[in-house]
Amino acid sequence: MGTSGEAIELDAGGRTVRLSSPEKVYFPERGFTKLDVARYYLAVGPGILRALSERPTTLERFPDGVAGESFYQKRAPKNVPDWLPTATVSFPSGRTADELCPTELAAVLWAANLGTLTFHPWAVRRAHPDHPDELRIDLDPQPGTDFSDAVRAAHELRAVLDEHGLRGWPKTSGGRGLHVFVPIEPRWDFTAVRRAAIAVGRELERRMPDAVTTAWWKEERGSRIFVDFNQTARDRTMASAYSIRPKPHAPVSAPLRWDELDEVRPEDFDVATMPARFAELGDVHGDLADHAFVLDSLLELADRDATDRGLGDLPYPPDYPKMPGEPKRVAPSRAKHDEHEGRE
């Protein structure tokens, strides 16, 4: 296509949004353009808005499509329109930033015009920026495992959640993994929610020791599904439901029903196929926001892990300040090497 085309205007929920260079190709392998991306988000509008509504959101931008340079934009652009609210969030470093906080579909289209393919909302809403209202569990396949292994882990995870009075909503990550979101009351801080995620992961690991791990160090994970508990740490986000992922075939993060987990593959869901699924089924996670569970039972499990099993905290990501009770952030092989060399 020789030209990116003249700017056009799109209606998003009654608000007009300008789309520049609508014919710019964003996915060369599929031929999808910037306009295709915008039309996709219009087609799944109620779903993407449900996933982002009132949430501080980091934008993953690809101004020249998936073949070009990309960057994460945490701070709201200076030209953000006055109708698009922001929310102030604080990072582990102590710094703060105003992030976009979508409240209407036009915000999604406005961000798409900037080259945003993937939306990364915080697990909080702007009314409670320090208290997550979702427990997000990331089932991350390691080398030697695939989506089917994540599905098996997800079924056992569902049983664990049920035993603790919780319900999760599964979705594809857009890659090989699965995310399970549990809506919770915004009563606990990030540290407590992370403790709950670790407790879930450890229980899953006990039930499926050959298939699931909570080992933070890659050298210890083996060919198992890693429960990435640090995705619940402050400032860590996951791609939202319905977000487009920056891979050549334009996959999307697809909300699923539990009864279809064994029948689907991640590649079933992309910019071309999701609109038809949404038109037929609507947002299969549409009722997620109608629920809010409590973490008391999982936090009691975390306490038992500490007192009865002697299991303490696990390492935080490397860019975090040292946290109280956290073990050394040294890979086991490095620790053995240092010990052998007589270093602390």
Image (spheres, helix red, strand yellow):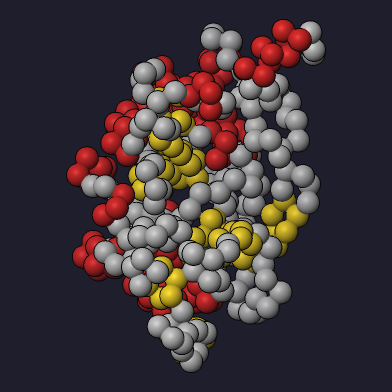
Image quadrant holding the N terminus, namely: bottom left
Q: Does residue 300 appear left or right of residue 224 in this picture?
A: right
Residue in the picture at 57% in, 52% down: 122
Q: Is residue 151 above or below residue 267?
A: above
Q: Is residue 21 something that shows in the picture? A: yes
Quadrant of the rendered structure where residue 282 is? bottom left
Q: Is residue 265 above or below residue 317?
A: below
Q: Is residue 51 something that shows in the picture? A: no
User: How far from the left and from the top, in percent, is residue 75?
Assistant: 68, 63
Residue that extends furthest to the front in the rendered view of this protein: 2
Quadrant of the rendered structure where residue 61 is? bottom right
Nearer to the camera, 342 or 297: 342
Q: Does residue 27 appear left or right of residue 309 in this picture?
A: left
Nearer to the camera, 238 or 174: 174
Residue in the picture at 38% in, 75% down: 36
Question: How many numbered markers are drawn?
Answer: 0
Q: Is residue 314 above or below residue 254?
A: above
Image quadrant holding the C terminus, namely: top right
Residue in the picture at 53% in, 33% down: 229
User: How far from the left and from the top, in percent, is residue 339?
Assistant: 73, 9
User: How far from the left and from the top, in percent, is residue 192?
Assistant: 60, 33
Nearer to the camera, 73 or 234: 73
Residue in the picture at 47% in, 85% down: 4
Q: Does residue 267 appear left or right of residue 322 in this picture?
A: left
User: How far from the left and from the top, in percent, is residue 268?
Assistant: 26, 54
